[in-house]
Image: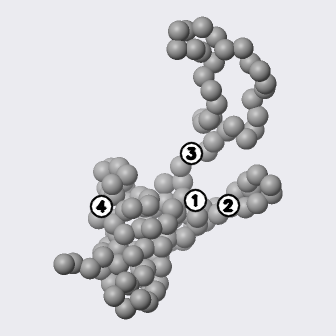
């Protein structure tokens, strides 16, 4: 399935736009990574300028920051408890930015974009 970020061929009135130039490879997009909780699996991708983008397919460890002690920990992810991006992501254990994960140290909110950055960074949430 091709996902593209290209203008429609049709005008709002139903008429056709005339092509000023051909479609280019840079206009194509890709499917979302939908990072899940499982043993670590990464994928690398060549991007514009020959750079590399690493994204997570699955992960089971997160870098968690504790704001009270100002320290970082590497902890195991147990499950996803809340995901504001999509309610169905909780059932499917899909990790996105803003998702709340249950870890050995407690609940933590994801601050990184696992499908774009290749790591899972989170901040520990303390109950009030």
Chain-order first, disc 1 or disc 3:
3
Residue density around tag 2, few if under 14, some if 14–19, many if 20 or more, within 10 Å: some
Residue density around tag 1, few if under 14, some if 14–19, many if 20 or more, within 10 Å: some
Can you give x and y, in whole percent of width and height, for residue 70 in the image? 41, 89
Residue ID at (79%, 24%):
21
Chain-order first, disc 1 or disc 2:
2
- Between label 2 and label 3, give the one nearer the viewer: 2
Judge from the rendering whether residue 122 lies leftward or rightward of residue 117; answer left or right: left
Can you give x and y, in whole percent of width and height, for residue 20 in the image? 77, 21
- Between label 1 and label 3, give the one nearer the viewer: 1
Asked if disc 4 and disc 2 are in contact, CB closer than 8 Å, the reply is no
SS state under label 3: loop
Asked if disc 1 and disc 4 are in contact, CB closer than 8 Å, the reply is no
Residue ID at (49%, 66%):
112
Asked if disc 4 and disc 3 are in contact, CB closer than 8 Å, the reply is no
Q: CA distance from mark 1 to mark 3?
A: 12 Å
Residue 104 showing in the rendered view: no
Q: Which residue was labeled with disc 3?
A: 31
Can you give x and y, in whole percent of width and height, for residue 60 in the image? 46, 73
Q: Which residue was labeled with disc 1?
A: 116
- Give residue 123's quadrant in the image: bottom left
Q: Which residue was labeled with disc 2?
A: 53
Q: As rendered, which of 54 and 79 lies closer to the eye?
A: 54
Chain-order first, disc 1 or disc 4:
4
Residue ID at (53%, 9%):
13
Asked if disc 1 and disc 2 are in contact, CB closer than 8 Å, the reply is yes
SS state under label 2: strand
Q: Is residue 122 above or below residue 48?
A: below
């Amino acid at each position: 399935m091709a996902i593209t970020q290209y203008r429609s061929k049709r005008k709002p009135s139903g008429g056709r736009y005339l092509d000023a130039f051909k479609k280019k490879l840079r206009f194509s997009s890709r499917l979302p990574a939908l990072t899940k909780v499982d043993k670590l699996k990464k994928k690398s991708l060549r991007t514009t300028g020959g750079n590399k983008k690493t994204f997570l397919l699955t992960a089971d460890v997160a870098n968690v920051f504790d704001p009270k002690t100002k320290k970082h920990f590497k902890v195991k992810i147990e499950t996803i408890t809340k995901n504001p991006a999509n309610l169905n992501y909780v059932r499917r254990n899909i990790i996105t930015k803003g998702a709340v994960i249950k870890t050995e140290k407690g609940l933590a909110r994801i601050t990184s974009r696992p499908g774009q950055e290749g790591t899972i960074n989170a901040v520990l949430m303390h109950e009030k």
